Image (cartoon, rainbow, N blue to C red):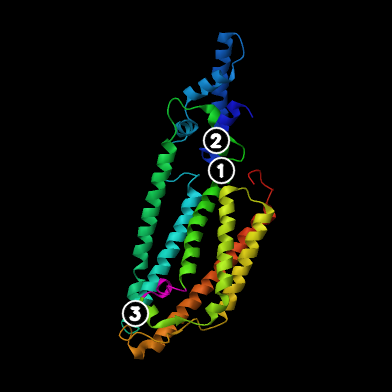
Amino acid sequence: MTLVERYLNAVRFFLPHRDQDDIVRELSENLSSEMEDRSQALGRDLSEPEVADILRRHGHPALVASRFAPRQHLIGPVVFPIYLFALKLGLGAALVVTVVLAVITSALQGVSVPVLFDGLKAYPTRALLVFAWTTLGFAAVDALGARAGFAPDWDPRRIPDWMGGRRQASRLHDRLQAGTEVVFGGIALVWLLLVPTSPWLAMGPLAAVLAFAPIWSVWYAPMVAVAAGNFLVDAYGLVRPTRTPRRLVLKLLLLGAQLGIALMILSARVWVVVAPHPQPGVVPAETLPALLTWVNTGVAIGFGVMVVATLVEMGKQYYRLRTLGRTPDR
């Protein structure tokens, strides 16, 4: 691939899909005309440094693309997939925090349904804040990235493969997503390892009066193994972002194990019990039965959502496995 072809591919990378062919064709004609005039003036073919100098004076691919197609979005195509992934995680985390806080607050006030619903009504506000800060943060990252490395003395011969190559952004997207999964997967794994000795991480103040049911001791080790497996697969994807059949099959096996564990835990029907020595004064004794019902119902709903989410993710991974190699960017 020639230097000009890499440059045109890099410009294409920053253009809206519907305008890519027309704009790249026009730019190619302009460059060809300029290089032909320069070659005729010198009476010989241009050397690579001379071609690079013309491309450098033409401008960085991102700036050239912005002149042809003005920026009309807050978050560009490179950052958007990871933004969407982070937004989903943030909204999900906000929902979990809202539900947990609502249940705990309700339990501490005598399992009051109005208090529970008052706590749940805080979710729209939290979700809006998550959306706003996530969007602003990624917009800032995208804007800074769009302006980075655009100095007048930039070198066209150093256009990265993910920008100037035929595969374009697929590997970069995979690496960004893998990086996010590694961060959140690592946090989840550490949390899972700490919960047995610090149950307040899972139950908050209710850990003073509640305890984990025996089912957790049966499936705890498999849960840690699956979480560690997912973390290692994602970490490998961060180093080598190319999708391979072996990696996708391994991901499917881990998701299958996760689904099986979730279904087995769901079949227990009791996940939280009264602590052997509950601390007095945390929750009124007469409200403990109702509190157990609320908490166990919440656990059932949570694992039900996990089952559905796991099935959806398995479908995605299976589709990727079936379509692997059918498109040029995979």
Query: Residue 180 appears at what percent x and percent y?
Result: 49, 54
Task: Check disc 1 and report the residue beneath it.
Answer: 169
The answer to whether residue 318 shows anywhere in this view is: no
Nearer to me, 191 or 313: 191
Q: Is residue 103 left or right of residue 179?
A: left
Quadrant of the drawing holding the N terminus: top right
Tell me, yes or no, whether the highlighted magenta stretch contains residue 244: no
Q: Amino acid at mark 1?
A: Ala
Earlier in the chain: of badge 2 and badge 3, it is: 3
Q: Position of residue 255 (x, y in %)?
A: 61, 65
Identity, as a three-letter code, of the amino acid under mark 2: Pro
User: What residue sits right under mark 2 in the picture?
Assistant: 160
Q: Which residues are magenta?
A: 196-204
Does any portion of residue 161 appear in the rendered image? yes
Q: Judge left or right: residue 172 versus residue 122.
A: right
- Circle 2 packing at 10 Å, graded few (<14), some (14-19), many (20+), is few
